[in-house]
């Protein structure tokens, strides 16, 4: 940390300054500095050297512009504002040189229990040091698996094909739209809507096919989250899923 900086350190920091950042009090952005680098290179390196020898910053270099950004619409309260520090480019160069050097020492200075902001460490390693015994999964879809959305869509399709068989053999009747078309089902992922004639035999036929689907795939219809909505002139239904 105390060894003199090298010109190469300064050049590397300037080359890696972030684009598109607002300037500090000096009004100089990283883009402006790089475009003028052939002219200011020597002055910039001398500035860093002077700081390393004296350990002191000028007042202008130390001064930061503080910009308040609203967190939400409740701007009457100070707690709903987030302070953002706009630092001058010279301060950023000095701080980044020190940060690059300090980064190499951090693993030696900080206990291994600290996993934040230290290269090569991850909180996942601390959380996953001890695993429980494996749990056999007989069915279901792993959340986050690339196949999950497709399997999630294909599974209800099996149920719809089963219902369609009932339409074909005329044991299940949907809502007739016209002479040729019936509205039978609509799906969004695993949210399924069945549109059936208000008839006890139709309900029982649909329930039988749902039961076949449940036995085959191990997926169960959750009656607590299922509702029957009567529509049209017939507002009562004897039978149905409860029976």
Image: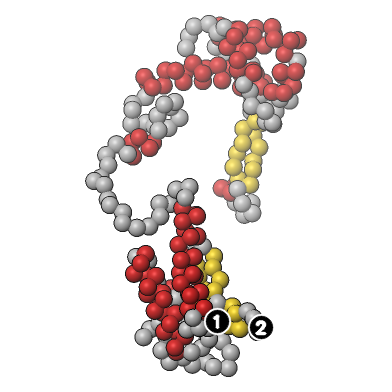
In this view, 238 is above or below 218: below
Where does label 1 land, which residue? Answer: 174
Q: Nearer the viewer, residue 217 or 48?
A: 217
> Callout 2 environment at 10 Å: few (<14), some (14 to 19), or many (20+)?
few
Foreground of the two, 47 or 227: 227
* Residue 33: mark: none
Q: In the picture shown, does residue 189 fall above or below 36?
A: below
**Location of residue 203 (image quadrant):** bottom left
Query: Which quarter of the image is occupied by the C terminus?
Result: bottom left
Under circle 2, the secondary element is loop
Q: In this figure, which residue is indicated by the disc labeled 2?
A: 178
Q: Residue furthest left?
A: 133
Left or right: 71 with respect to 205? right
Residue 169 position in % (x across, y down): 49, 81
In the image, what residue occupies the spot 66% across and 83% down?
178
Residue 38 image offset from top left, x and y in percent = 74, 10
- Judged from the image, the secondary structure of the residue bearing numbered disc 1 is loop
Q: Residues within 10 Å of mark 1 (few under 14, many from 20)?
A: some
């Amino acid at each position: 940390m105390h060894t003199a900086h090298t010109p190469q350190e300064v050049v590397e920091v300037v080359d890696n300054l972030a684009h598109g950042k607002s300037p500090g009090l000096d009004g100089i952005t990283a883009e402006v500095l790089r475009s003028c680098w052939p002219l200011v290179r020597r002055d910039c390196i001398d500035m860093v050297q002077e700081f390393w020898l004296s350990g002191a910053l000028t007042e202008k270099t130390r001064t930061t512009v503080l910009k308040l950004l609203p967190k939400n619409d409740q701007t009457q309260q100070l707690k709903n504002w987030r302070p953002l520090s706009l630092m001058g480019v010279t301060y950023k160069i000095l701080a980044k040189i020190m940060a690059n050097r300090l980064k190499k020492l951090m693993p030696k200075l900080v206990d291994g229990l600290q996993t934040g902001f230290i290269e090569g460490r991850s909180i996942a390693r601390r959380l996953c040091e001890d695993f429980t015994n494996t749990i056999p999964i007989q069915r279901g879809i792993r959340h986050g698996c690339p196949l999950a959305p497709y399997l999630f869509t294909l599974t209800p399709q099996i149920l719809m094909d089963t219902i369609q068989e009932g339409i074909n053999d005329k044991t299940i009747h949907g809502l007739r739209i016209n002479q040729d078309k019936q509205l039978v089902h609509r799906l969004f992922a695993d949210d399924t809507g069945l549109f059936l004639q208000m008839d006890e035999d139709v309900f029982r036929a649909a329930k039988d096919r749902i039961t076949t689907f449940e036995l085959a795939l191990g997926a169960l219809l959750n009656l607590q989250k299922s509702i029957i909505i009567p529509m049209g002139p017939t507002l009562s239904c004897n039978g149905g899923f409860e029976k």
